[in-house]
Image (cartoon, rainbow, N blue to C red):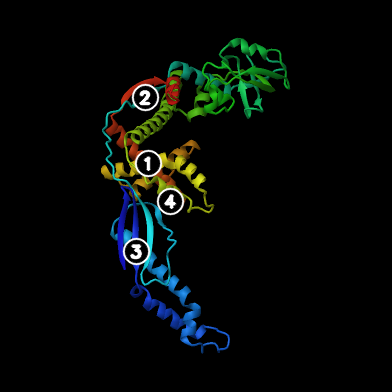
C-alpha cells in the first residue's frame, strides 16, 4: 500500500491511500473459504456450492469489507506514525469515478490539523487585577441584614415607612416573575416607596423600571432581568403584595454571635464587622480571579493569531453527533464554538510551554480541599481524615466528576500562570466599582 500526504494549506491536508490486491487478496480468499461450508445457492446442497459461485455471490461484499478494514487500520497507524495532531477526525472524500473493480483502489481522506502558532504570555497588555474591598457601607448593610434575619417579624395590616414588603414583581412581556422583599431604601427615589404606603396584602402597585434603582444592575437581582435587558429597560411592572412586616432587630449580643459563627468565635460588634469583611473579601477575591482569568482569556484569543481549518471543521460538524447537521446548522455551530476552540488550543500550548501537568495527587488535593469547604458550610468543621478521604475516593471513582474537577484544577493552575506572566496592573476597588468594571461600564 502506498500512503502519502498532500497539503491543501497550512492546516488542511489530504491523505491519499492506494490499495493493491496484495493488501487484501489473502484475507478475501480466507473469508471465501470460510464461507463455502455455509453458502446456500439454489440447486446445490449446503456446503457443496462450487467456489466460483460462492465468489460470485459473496465475493464483492467480502472484498469491500476486507479492503475497508485494511484502509481503517492503515489510516490509524499512519496518523500515529506521522504524529499528526488532528482537529476532528479524517473525513472520506467522495470520488464519483471510484470503481471496486480497479486494479488499484484509491481512497482519500481530508484532515484538519492543529495550527502551529507562537504564544506570548508576556505580551504587553492593559489587564487589571482587581482587589475588591468591603467598605463600611457594605459591612453596615450586612450587619443590619443579620439583625433583620434573626430579629422578630411583626405582621402589619398596611404598609408603613419602616415596613418590609414581600411580594412578586411581574411583567408578562419581559417574562418577569420574581418573588422578593422590598423596603424604602431599595429605590433610587425614596418617593417611589410612597406608592406602597397604606396598601394591604393583595393590593397591586405598579412601578416603572427606568431609573428605579441607583444601579440598573439591581434589576438582575430584584426582578431577575438578564444583563442584556438591563440598560434602558422602560416597562411597567406590577408588584403584588403578599406579606407586610416590620422587623424588631435582633440584639447584637453573644447569643447571636455564637449562633452565627460558633461558640466563642467572636465577642463584639467590631469582631463581627471584621469577620464580615474577611468573609466578603474572600468571596470577592474568587470573583476577581474569575474576572482576571476571563480577561486574560479574551486578550490571548484576540492577540494570538492563527488559522483554523474552518471549512473542514464545518464539514466535520455535519457528520458527528446523533443529529446530523445541515450545512447551515454547521455554520452556526462553528461560529458558536470557534472562540472556545481557539482558547482550548491556547490553553494546551500554555500548559506545554510552561510544563504544567495535572497529576492524580493534584486532583486528590484539590478534591480534598473542596470537600472540606463543603463540609464546613454544613457545620462539620473538624471532620476526620478518614471521613474526608472516604468521600474523596467516592468522588474520584466517578469519571464525570474526575473530568469536571480536572478542568477546575487546570483553570486554577492557568490562573496562577497568568497572574505571573501577564503581570496585570493591580487596582483596589469597592464591590460596586468591581461590578461596574465586570460589565464593561
Which numbered disc, 3 or 1, marks the residue that appears first in the sequence?
Answer: 3
Q: Secondary structure at mark 2?
A: strand
Measured as percent of width and height from the top left, residue 277 is found at 43, 23
Q: Is residue 242 visible?
A: no
Q: Which residue is mark 3?
A: 17
Rendered position, 414 above or below 363: above
Where residue 233 sits: x, y (%)? Answer: 57, 21
**Marks 4 and 1: CB-CB under 8 Å?**
no
Give neighbour class at mark 4: few <14, some 14-19, many 20+ (Cα, 10 Å). Answer: some
Q: CA distance from mark 4 to mark 2?
A: 34 Å
Q: Earlier in the sequence, mark 3 or mark 4?
A: 3
Q: Which comes sooner in the sequence, label 2 or label 1? A: 2
Which disc is residue 342 wearing?
1
Q: Which residue is mark 4?
A: 396
* Residue to which mark 2 is pinned: 131
Q: Name above or below for residue 96 compared with residue 264.
A: below
Which-is-in-front pick, marks 3 and 4?
A: 3
User: Helix, strand or loop at disc 3?
Assistant: strand
Residue 190 x %, y % = 59, 11
Residue 244 appears in the figure: yes
Left or right relative to 284: residue 422 = left
Q: How would you rate the neighbour count of disc 1 (Cα within 10 Å): few for under 14, some for 14-19, many for 20 or more?
A: some
Amino acid at each position: 500500500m502506498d500512503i502519502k500526504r498532500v497539503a491543501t494549506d497550512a492546516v488542511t491536508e489530504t491523505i491519499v491511500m492506494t490499495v493493491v490486491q496484495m493488501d487484501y487478496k489473502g484475507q478475501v480468499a480466507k473469508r471465501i473459504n470460510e464461507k463455502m461450508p455455509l453458502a446456500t445457492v439454489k440447486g446445490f446442497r449446503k456446503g457443496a456450492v462450487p467456489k466460483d459461485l460462492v465468489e460470485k455471490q459473496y465475493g464483492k461484499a467480502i472484498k469491500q469489507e476486507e479492503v475497508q478494514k485494511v484502509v481503517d487500520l492503515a489510516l490509524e497507524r499512519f496518523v500515529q506514525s506521522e504524529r499528526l495532531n488532528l482537529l476532528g477526525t479524517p473525513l472520506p472524500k467522495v470520488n464519483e469515478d471510484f470503481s471496486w473493480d480497479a486494479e488499484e483502489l484509491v481512497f482519500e481522506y481530508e484532515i484538519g490539523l492543529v495550527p502551529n502558532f507562537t504564544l506570548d504570555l508576556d505580551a504587553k497588555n492593559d489587564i487589571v487585577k482587581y482587589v475588591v474591598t468591603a467598605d463600611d457601607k457594605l459591612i453596615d448593610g450586612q450587619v443590619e441584614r443579620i439583625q433583620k434575619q434573626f430579629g422578630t417579624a411583626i405582621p402589619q395590616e398596611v404598609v408603613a415607612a419602616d415596613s418590609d414588603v414581600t411580594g412578586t414583581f411581574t411583567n408578562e412581556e419581559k417574562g418577569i416573575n420574581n418573588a422578593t422583599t422590598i423596603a424604602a431604601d431599595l429605590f433610587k427615589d425614596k418617593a417611589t416607596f410612597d406608592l406602597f404606603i397604606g396598601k394591604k396584602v393583595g393590593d397591586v402597585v405598579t412601578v416603572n423600571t427606568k431609573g428605579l434603582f441607583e444601579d440598573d444592575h439591581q434589576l438582575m437581582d430584584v426582578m431577575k432581568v438578564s444583563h442584556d435587558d438591563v440598560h434602558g429597560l422602560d416597562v411597567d411592572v406590577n408588584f403584588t403584595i403578599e406579606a407586610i412586616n416590620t422587623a424588631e432587630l435582633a440584639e447584637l449580643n453573644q447569643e447571636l454571635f455564637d449562633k452565627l459563627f460558633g461558640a466563642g468565635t467572636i465577642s463584639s460588634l467590631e469582631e463581627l464587622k471584621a469577620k464580615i469583611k474577611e468573609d466578603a473579601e474572600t468571596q470577592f477575591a474568587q470573583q476577581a480571579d474569575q474576572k482576571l482569568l476571563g480577561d486574560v482569556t479574551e486578550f490571548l484569543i484576540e492577540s494570538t493569531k492563527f488559522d483554523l481549518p474552518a471549512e473542514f471543521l464545518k464539514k466535520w460538524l455535519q457528520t458527528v453527533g446523533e443529529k446530523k447537521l445541515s450545512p447551515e446548522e454547521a455554520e452556526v455551530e462553528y461560529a458558536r464554538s470557534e472562540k472556545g476552540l481557539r482558547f482550548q488550543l491556547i490553553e494546551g500550548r500554555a500548559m506545554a510551554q510552561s510544563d504544567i501537568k495535572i497529576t492524580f495527587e493534584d486532583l486528590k488535593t484539590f478534591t480534598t480541599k473542596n470537600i472540606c469547604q463543603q463540609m464546613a458550610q454544613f457545620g462539620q468543621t473538624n471532620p476526620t481524615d478518614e471521613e474526608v478521604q472516604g468521600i474523596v475516593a467516592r468522588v474520584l471513582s466517578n469519571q464525570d466528576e474526575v473530568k469536571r474537577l480536572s478542568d477546575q484544577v487546570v483553570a486554577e493552575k492557568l490562573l496562577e500562570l497568568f497572574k505571573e506572566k501577564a503581570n496585570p496592573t493591580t487596582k483596589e476597588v469597592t464591590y460596586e466599582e468591581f461590578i461596574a468594571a465586570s460589565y464593561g461600564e
